[in-house]
Amino acid sequence: MYDTHPLHRRRRLRDWAISIPMAAALVAGLYLWLNHIKEQNAQERAAMANTKIVYVADPVQKLVRRTDGSYYKATPEAEAPYTGTYDYTAVEDHDVVVPGNVSVKERHEQPHLLWHHLTFTNDIEVRIIGPHEADRTPRVERLRCTVEPVDASKPSYTGDPHARSRLKIGPHEEGTGAGRLRGLFSNRGRQLCQDRITILVPDGSLQP
């Protein structure tokens, strides 16, 4: 049986009068939020599509022989055998000899609410200088990846290209569906580009 008491009917009507506007407000808020996210994603995709990767050469570091007779020494990390640090000795202007190193993994300080550094991956190659090459100087060459707009009059990606992004350079978004939603709350994704580091030496032997 339905309760037909006037007081109870008025109470139910009052509850409906409160709950319906609240539900409508929640639906409207969710719709506006999703619309904002959709517009933001469209702007990011447009910026990425108007962005290209370019490589800028750092000054070449000329290598000198180390005290152990080698030009460099590779120190692999035990927990990650395919990454490591390469130590070497270079000569700068006025014949100043300085120690240096390059690493497959680099940590860049970047103050943030939740973390204070980001880890980037470099592309490091050791190349043996051939006996008939014109330049037989042992050296370290580094090409730093950076970004430029395709059309300078339009918005383009202005972040650090070493960082991981859920979007990639070009007209297509990286990932679909749930992957895009997860990307809204994190910076996980692919690294847009890596610095290209080449160690050129007369021979490729590594010191222990």
Image: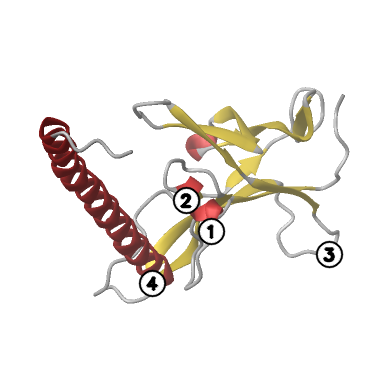
In the displayed structure, 36 sits above or below 93; it is below
Q: Residues within 10 Å of mark 3 (few under 14, many from 20)?
A: few
Question: What scheme was used to colour the molecule?
Answer: secondary structure
The label nearer to you, 3 versus 4, is: 4
Return the mark for residue 135: none
CA distance for labels 2 and 1 = 7 Å
Q: CA distance from mark 3 to mark 1?
A: 54 Å
Among numbered discs 3 and 1, the one appearing first in the sequence: 3
Q: Secondary structure at mark 3?
A: loop
Q: Which residue is mark 4?
A: 50
* Rendered view: 153 above or below 99: below
Q: Residues within 10 Å of mark 4 (few under 14, many from 20)?
A: many
Picture coordinates of residue 132, whole percent (x, y): 83, 64
Q: Which residue is mark 3?
A: 132
Q: Residue at x 46, y 52 (%)?
A: 161
Residue 85 occupies quadrant? top right
